[in-house]
Image (cartoon, grey):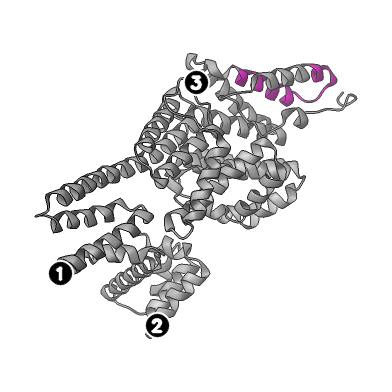
Amino acid sequence: MDLYKIVSQLTHKEFDEVYSTFTANNADKSAAFLKIIRENPESPDKDFLAEFDIAPSAFYVLKSRLNQKIEAFLLNRVGDSNLHVVRRVLSVNDLVFNNPREITVAALRKLEKELLKFDFPYGLMIVYKELQNQYAFDEDNYTFYKSRYNRQVAYALAMDEAVDHVVQFFYAFDNWYLSRKDRDLAEMVRAMEKIDNKNNLYDSHRLFIFKAIIHIFARLFIEIPDDIRCEVEELEAMFDKSFEILEKYKDDAFYKNINILFNFLRFVHYDDLQVRDKANMYYEILDYKIEELLQRYHYNAPTSLFLARKLQFHKRTNTLPALLNDVDKYITKIELEPYRIARYVNFHFFIAQAYFVNSDYKRCSRILYTLRNEVNLRKYIHVNLEVKFFQALSYVMMEDFDLANQLILSLQRQLRKPTMSKYAHGKILLKILNLALAGRPRTRSKNLTTQLERWKDGNVGRYALLEDIDLEKLFQYEEGEGA
């Protein structure tokens, strides 16, 4: 456990709660160390040892106890309104061994009803196994409950596999987002087909939710091939059924935690349809939860894509200074690890765009330069091109000819490769950058206009680059400008 990082990520309320447990027990050194970690997570050991005279062995014990306290706090924080049902499942052995059969069977059947509503196959497996054993001398009931037990085993396996399909779908999407390869698109389609088959085998609201997550996401973000071997349902119908389930089981911890993902999907849906009143309603909900969208699990769904929509919102509403304020005061302070490349790139690309649209090209270029040095993007063809082109564009806007030319030459070499034939429009962008670097004489204005028109026509579809940047507006010259 990375104690220092966890302490820095606790909310103020959570930190105060942990801190108070030490002060209440007069554990002053532990409380002091906790506070030092919070205020300076970079070198807390050094700061603490400089303030307190403590032996290395005693310091080791102090850190160990602090670890245990934090782990216990995190575990106790886990809550679920259905936890009482799980506790009853764990108490089944006590029920079976300490009651007559009639009482045991009646209690197990009552617990069965609760678990069926809860849709908890792992608990039902235990209940049906015990009912099967209770009817060991009653062939009909024994066979009945054995059959139910076997079905729950199969259903539990189906649930586990459904989760795997969701995670694999979003893993494939991340790879597709970075490189735009057909094999990753095919992997997403396979996940859709597999989870559709699982959903058709069981009448399960949880399996439907898993299906809805990736089917809705696919409809919104990828091109689904016509030969897909599963039912592609109408979007509104899937949304309606999903929200009906979320409302019906609103106290269920799983649905409470997955609700934000459906809010994100619904926002994208309305934003694509340009239904502004509904899109704005969901935007307001999500805009206050950017940290949660970026840092929480959500089955690895790429909810960081909300950032691109946030950029579009501020451009559309002419509130770019507000965007910059959000970035400087809030978003740049969110900590992300680079283990998940797509999210990490998306996050920094958005910050760079926020500076770019506010004409701070120098800070934009620094963000992109740092990004390219922190993570190796060479094997991710699409995003590598996009980041390099964006960095070159920022140098052009700064009129830093040397740095711009270095990147342009690198991009030219890259685009000459036979494997880059799908990026023919990238060569048009190189011409635009070269024309822009050559100054703004009137004689070049016509050539630039021609290339910008070609760029607009060619930069479409799966391999489009810098879609959120309006190059025509950026390089729009007045007729009399230039020498």
Q: Is residue 359 visible?
A: no
Q: Secondary structure at mark 2?
A: helix
Left or right, 96 with reference to 232: left
3D distance between C-alphas at marks 2 and 3: 66 Å
Where does label 3 land, which residue? 226
Where does label 2 land, which residue? 28
> 224 or 483, which lies in front?
224
> 286 or 335, which lies in front?
286
- Residue at the image position 20 percent from the left and 50 percent from the top: 145
Q: Residues within 10 Å of mark 1 (few under 14, many from 20)?
A: few
- Residue at the image position 67 percent from the left and 36 percent from the top: 273
| Residue type (three-letter) at the residue carrying disc 1 | Pro
Q: Is residue 188 visible?
A: yes
Q: Which mark is residue 438?
A: none
Instruction: Specify the quadrant that holds the N terminus.
Output: bottom left
| Residue type (three-letter) at the residue carrying disc 3 | Asp
Where does label 1 land, which residue? 100
Q: Which residues are magenta?
A: 425-446
- Residue at the image position 55 percent from the left and 38 percent from the top: 237
Task: Point out residue 418 in the picture as x, y percentages from the top left corner.
Answer: 49, 13
Q: Secondary structure at mark 1?
A: loop
> 95 or 300, which lies in front?
95
Q: Main secondary structure of the magenta part?
A: helix
Left or right, 175 with reference to 448: left
Please say if 172 is above or below 326: above
